[in-house]
Structure formats: C-alpha cells, structure tokens
Image (cartoon, rainbow, N blue to C red):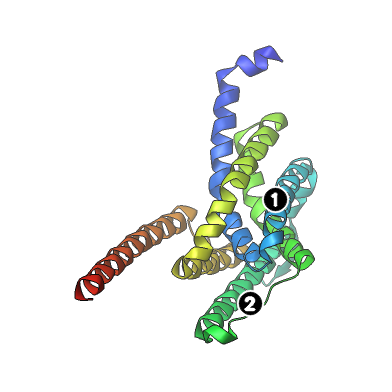
C-alpha cells in the first residue's frame, strides 16, 4: 500500500483525473445551480449537496459497471446505415432534455423580468422533482467523465479517489457559483445559453457528429470574460451616475 502511495505515477494520475473531473463537471455544476435556484432558499443547500452526492454516486457506480458501459458502445440497432448504441440514445435524450429545460428557464426568467414589482411573486419548484432532474441529467454528464477516467487510469481506487476529490471541490464552490448566477441575471442567461450549447453538442455526438469540446469550453470562457468586463463597466457607470447625482443635488 505504501509503495502504491509513494509512486509518483499514482499521484500524477490522481491529480490529472481530479482536474479533468472538475472541468468536465462545470456544465453539471451550472445545471445544478440553475435548478437549485428555483427552490425555496431554506432547501437550496440540501438540494445542492444531494445533487452533487448523486453525481459522485453515479460516477462511482458506473466505474464498477465497466461491462455495462462496454455494452453501451456496441450497436443496439441500425437506422439506415447508421448504427445506434445505448450511449447514443442516452446522449440524445439527455441533450434534448437539456435543450428543453434551458429554453423553459430562459422563458421563465424573461417572464419574471417583464412583471411589475407587485406581480413578481416567485414560483418555487418541488424538492423531489428538482433532485430527480439533477439525477437524470447527471447520468448523461457522467458518461464522458467515466470513459475519460477509464482511459487514463488503470487502478479503480485512483479513479474513485479522483472523483471524490473533484465532487468535494464542487460542493465547496457550488454555493458561490449559484449565488453569483442569481445575483447577475445576465450571467444566468449566459449560463443557460451554455447549457443549450452543451445540449446541441450532446445531440450532435449522439448522431456521430463530433464537436470538439475544446472549442465549446473556449467559447464559454471567452463569453464569461466579456461578461465580466461588462459587469465591471456597469458598476463603474452606476458609481459615476451616483456621484454626478450627488454633486447635482
């Protein structure tokens, strides 16, 4: 055991996998933040921890289901000359669900913004339904991370340790991410737009049209950077306006 822990390759594999799990979990974290934001404040933390615990359990369960994962990549039936696998079906249904959910959330956000202050009573979602939605979409998000883990590490204990470490980091930052999204409506719409983009990518992958994830993540990072500049600019303009009003008064 000590020799295993003293091996630099073990730690290299662990750190690499943990970082990849965090990167691949960003979309999951955004989705959880959006869904949890629809719950009453008193239940948001419980739903957040429950959702991320489900994410961890799903990934570990899939690691122990290597044979089942292998069957997912073998053809189940054919549509014309195109072979359709279980993984394709999961990605297609998950992508479609993500598209529908994101569009509905954007619609509800716009309806809420269009209401007057007196009409803006917030409609909250149910706890159980929120957790079920998190569990359903997490299975889709788990596939890529598990296939990546199996490809990079041979020892299942390293994979499990990396998944646990990544989920603990996500639990630590998830509340801050959710609060930031809720404070800035434009960031929330941007996050939902990312989820639409990811949904399209999942559907494309299901029909064997590969969209490099590096392009997606770069586009997301660039959009976030531009929005951060916009938020900073709006703050500066608001501060200047307050100063001008004070001087004028």
* Percent position of residue 140, x then y: 67, 58
Front residue of 218/171: it is 171
Q: Going from the N terminus, do you reach mark 1 or mark 2 first?
A: 1
* Percent position of residue 31, x then y: 60, 61
Front residue of 53/87: it is 53
Front residue of 133/155: it is 133
Residue drawn where x is 69% and y is 68% of the image: 93
* Percent position of residue 126, x then y: 75, 69
Residue drawn where x is 45% and y is 52% of the image: 214
Residue drawn where x is 64% and y is 18% of the image: 5
Question: The residue tagged with tag 2: helix, strand or loop?
Answer: loop
In the rendered image, the quadrant that contains the N terminus is: top right
> Where 82 falls versus 144 (above or below)?
below
Disc 1 to disc 2, how far (Cα)?
A: 23 Å
Question: Which disc, if any, is residue 177?
Answer: none
Looking at the rendered image, the disc whose residue lies closer to the viewer, 1 or 2, is 2
> Where 151 falls versus 99 (above or below)?
above
Q: Can residue 81 be seen here?
A: no
- Tell me where residue 160 sits by quadrant: top right
In the rendered image, the quadrant that contains the C terminus is: bottom left
Front residue of 91/116: it is 116
In the picture of the structure, the residue carrying the numbered disc 1 is: 49
Residue 72 relative to residue 114: left or right: right
Q: Can residue 44 be seen here?
A: yes
In the picture of the structure, the residue carrying the numbered disc 2 is: 122
Residue drawn where x is 53% and y is 68% of the image: 192
Residue 165 relative to residue 195: left or right: right
């Amino acid at each position: 055991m000590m020799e295993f822990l003293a091996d630099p390759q073990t730690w290299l594999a662990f750190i690499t996998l943990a970082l990849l799990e965090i990167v691949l979990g960003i979309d999951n974290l955004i989705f959880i933040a959006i869904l949890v934001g629809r719950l009453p404040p008193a239940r948001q933390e419980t739903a957040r921890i429950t959702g991320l615990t489900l994410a961890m359990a799903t990934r570990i369960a899939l690691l122990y289901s290597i044979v089942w994962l292998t069957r997912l990549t073998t053809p189940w039936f054919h549509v014309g000359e195109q072979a359709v696998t279980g993984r394709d079906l999961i990605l297609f249904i998950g992508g479609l669900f993500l598209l529908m959910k994101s569009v509905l959330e954007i619609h509800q956000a716009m309806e809420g913004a269009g209401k007057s202050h007196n009409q803006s009573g917030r409609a909250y979602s149910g706890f159980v339904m929120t957790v079920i939605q998190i569990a359903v979409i997490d299975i889709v998000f788990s596939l890529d991370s598990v296939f990546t883990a199996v490809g990079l590490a041979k020892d299942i204990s390293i994979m499990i340790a990396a998944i646990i470490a990544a989920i603990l980091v996500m639990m630590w930052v998830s509340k801050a991410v959710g609060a930031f999204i809720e404070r800035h409506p434009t960031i929330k719409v941007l996050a939902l737009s990312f989820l639409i983009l990811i949904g399209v990518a999942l559907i494309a992958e299901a029909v064997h049209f590969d969209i490099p994830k590096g392009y997606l993540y770069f586009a997301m990072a660039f959009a976030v950077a531009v929005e951060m500049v916009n938020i900073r600019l709006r703050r500066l303009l608001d501060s200047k306006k307050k100063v001008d009003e004070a001087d004028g008064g």
